Image (tube, grey):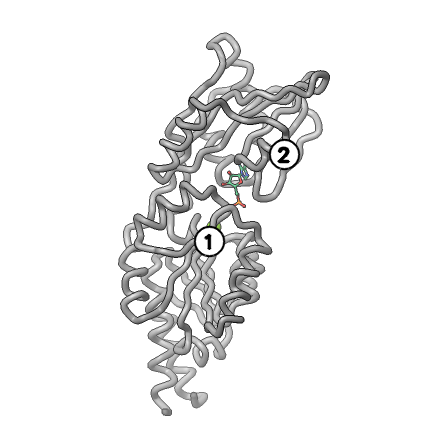
Amino acid sequence: ATPTAIMVGVGKGAENNILIKDAESLEVGYRVNAVVLDKTGTITEGRPIVTDLVWAVSETEQAQLKAILYALESQSEHPLAEAITTYLADVKPVALDKFESVTGRGVTAHYQNHTYFIGNQILLADQQTAPSDTLTQQAMHLQNQAKTVVFMGRLDQDTQTGDVLAIIAIADPVKASSKQAIDTLQNRGIEVYMLTGDNAQTAAAVSKQVGIKQYRAETMPADKANFVKELQAAGKVVAMVGDGINDSQALAQADVSIAMGRGSDIAMDVARMTLITSDLISVPKALQLSKQTVRVIR
Ligand code: ADP
Ligand code: MG
């Protein structure tokens, strides 16, 4: 495109809440035939709320465990942790040792002669702990409602026996316009994919709500980037849309990178386009803008 066409495109973007950092994005955007969307904060609101706390222990044990749960999550910066500490706002935390945050899995710490952990099934497996069949069924039921379920467990350091103590279900509703935005892209013949660090069951429920057929669950930041690479190797021109630190590798890999407004600074730093709005409708708009910009001179 000519410099003038690009200036016009950048200006039109700004009018539509699309900040274009790199004019080259405008020249590539019209060729995009695969769009990869992060789940949390991109397709969903990204403001998770605890809906269920299901205990697998007696009521007398719950008070202390709540204090441990609160203490663990108050040291984590994950949005799920914020949902849990907000839910337990009136609990007094205990002092824990050896807090650790395990990327893509959860958090662990020591208290008395136990290791306590909160996170996904992979974290449970790491700690040689498995939920009972009843608890697994309850978790699946909640996950089928598109909720994220995390497990609280404990490992006895002397006997190395593990227990699952509770499950916590967290809802993060899909944004009002996500489905429409995804429909618009698909109607233009663009393939749409979803990537998430969340579990497969919840991923399936969310992707179904918005009409995405292809998704990958339990992805780590490098997996997200590799997925983009795989699409590129298959000849696709890929736009990646994300909001988190865990999306920045994939954003850097994509042909066109779009950060959601209100996302992490790192995502906005890496991405060549930033949407000031959190509305996913801006994604098809941004790609359309590219088409118009390039068409001016073709
Ligand atoms: P995403 O943001 O895409 O959900 P993450 O990699 O941040 O992916 O997290 C993946 C999963 O790890 C979460 O769905 C959750 O099960 C678990 N997890 C991460 N941090 C925490 C935490 N502080 N408390 C409980 N679970 C956590
Ligand atoms: Mg996210």
Task: Note whether residue 262 is visible.
Answer: no
In the picture shown, does residue 15 fall above or below 159? below
Tell me which residue sits at (39%, 67%) in the image. Answer: 18
Q: Nearer the viewer, residue 222 or 69?
A: 222
Ranked by sequence position, the earlier of labels 1 and 2 is 2
Tell me which residue sits at (40%, 61%) in the image. Answer: 276
Q: Tag 1, which secondary structure?
A: strand
Local packing at callout 1 (Cα closer than 10 Å; few below 14, some 14-19, many 20+) is many
Question: Mark 1 vs ligand 1: CB under 8 Å?
Answer: yes
Q: Quadrant of residue 214?
A: bottom left
The quadrant of the image that shows the N terminus is bottom left
Measure the C-alpha gap from mark 1 to mark 2: 23 Å
Name the spot of residue 286 as percent of width and height, x first.
Answer: 37, 70
In the picture shown, does residue 69 fall above or below 269? above
Amino acid under disc 2: Asp
Residue found farthest to the top: 60
Tell me which residue sits at (41%, 65%) in the image. Answer: 35
Task: Note whether residue 269 is visible.
Answer: yes
Name the spot of residue 207 as percent of width and height, x first.
Answer: 36, 50
Name the spot of residue 43 as percent of width and height, x first.
Answer: 38, 52
Q: Nearer the viewer, residue 145 or 1?
A: 145
Amino acid under disc 1: Leu
Q: Quadrant of residue 190?
A: bottom left
Check if mark 1's residue and mark 2's residue have beta carbons within 8 Å: no
Residue found farthest to the front: 133
The quadrant of the image that shows the C terminus is bottom left
Q: Tag 2, which secondary structure?
A: helix
| Viewer-nearest of discs 1 and 2 | 2
Q: Which residue is mark 1?
A: 195
- Mark number displayed over residue 46: none
Q: Which residue is mark 2?
A: 126
In the picture shown, does residue 158 fall above or below 184? above
